[in-house]
């Protein structure tokens, strides 16, 4: 079974700033969200957890798994999509003239600039992580939790569900929401059911 969770809230989330690789910690509300998620999802079985090394994801995983003795492993391939020099910009999805605006409205036409990462690069690294790390462990019957970020998580979710690039943002999970892929055979074949 595979579970994917988005990190808790940060101050940059509340001010609608592009975070990307900027290593912003959780705010107090984000920590409370992780505690609430720990209680809400207490019955879910995990054998191990993989997390982005960025503070907001790693701290979410640590709070969420507190007291359960579940191994937590960080992996660079789970870092958020890089927005390069545009990280820290506020409300970019409301600024049609901004180079990153297109990513949020017409992702198929997005052309990265200013040191930003392309969606193709994101899919390559998360695809590598899935094929080399996750798929073999799922085949062994392991229950795995991935704790990451909005765009990074979607690159995995959309790949599994076969969602086209034009609909990239349609299944964006909320902060500390867990998406569960319960049909291992379908997941291994590239399809899954979620709830």
Image (cartoon, rainbow, N blue to C red):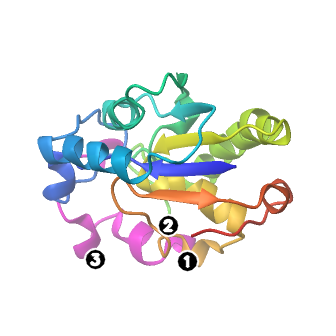
Q: Is 96 covered by the magenta stretch?
A: yes
- Specify whether 21 is left or right of 162: left
- Specify whether 62 is left or right of 31: right
Judge depth for marks 1 and 3 and give the one in front: 1
Q: CA distance from mark 2 to mark 1?
A: 13 Å
Rendering coords of residue 51 (x, y %): 49, 33
Q: CA distance from mark 1 to mark 3?
A: 19 Å
Rendering coords of residue 137 (x, y %): 78, 35
- Residue 149, visible in the rendered structure: yes
Does the CB distance between marks 2 and 1 fall below 8 Å?
no
Count the marks: how many?
A: 3
The residue to which callout 3 is attached is: 96
Which residue is more in the foreground, 128 or 184? 184
Judge depth for marks 2 and 1 and give the one in front: 1
Image quarter (top left, top right, bottom left or bottom right) of the C terminus? bottom right
Up-down relation of residue 51 to residue 176 (above or below): above
- Specify whether 195 is left or right of 105: right
Query: Which quadrant of the view contains residue 145?
Result: top right
Mark 3 or mark 2: name the one nearer the start of the chain: 3
Residue at 23% from the left image edge and 34% from the top image edge? 25
Does the CB distance between marks 3 and 2 fall below 8 Å?
no
From which residue to which does the magenta span run?
Answer: 84-109
The residue to which callout 2 is attached is: 110
The residue to which callout 1 is attached is: 167
Residue at 42% from the left image edge and 55% from the top image edge? 150
């Amino acid at each position: 079974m595979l579970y994917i969770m988005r990190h808790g809230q940060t101050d940059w989330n509340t001010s609608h700033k592009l975070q990307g690789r900027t290593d912003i910690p959780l705010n107090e509300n984000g920590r409370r969200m992780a505690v609430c998620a720990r209680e809400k999802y207490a019955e879910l079985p995990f054998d191990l957890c993989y997390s982005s090394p960025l503070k907001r994801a790693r701290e979410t995983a640590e709070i969420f798994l507190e007291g359960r003795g579940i191994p937590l492993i960080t992996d660079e391939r789970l870092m958020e999509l890089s927005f390069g020099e545009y990280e820290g910009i506020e409300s970019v999805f409301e600024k049609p003239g901004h180079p990153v605006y297109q990513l949020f409205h017409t992702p198929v036409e997005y052309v990265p600039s200013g040191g930003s990462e392309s969606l193709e690069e994101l899919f390559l690294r998360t695809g590598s992580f899935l094929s080399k790390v996750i798929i073999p462990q799922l085949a062994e019957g392991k229950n795995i939790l991935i704790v990451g970020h909005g765009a990074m998580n979607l690159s995995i979710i959309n790949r599994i569900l076969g969602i086209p690039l034009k609909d990239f943002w349609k299944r964006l999970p909320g902060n500390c929401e867990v998406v569960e892929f319960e049909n291992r055979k379908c997941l291994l074949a590239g399809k899954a059911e979620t709830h």
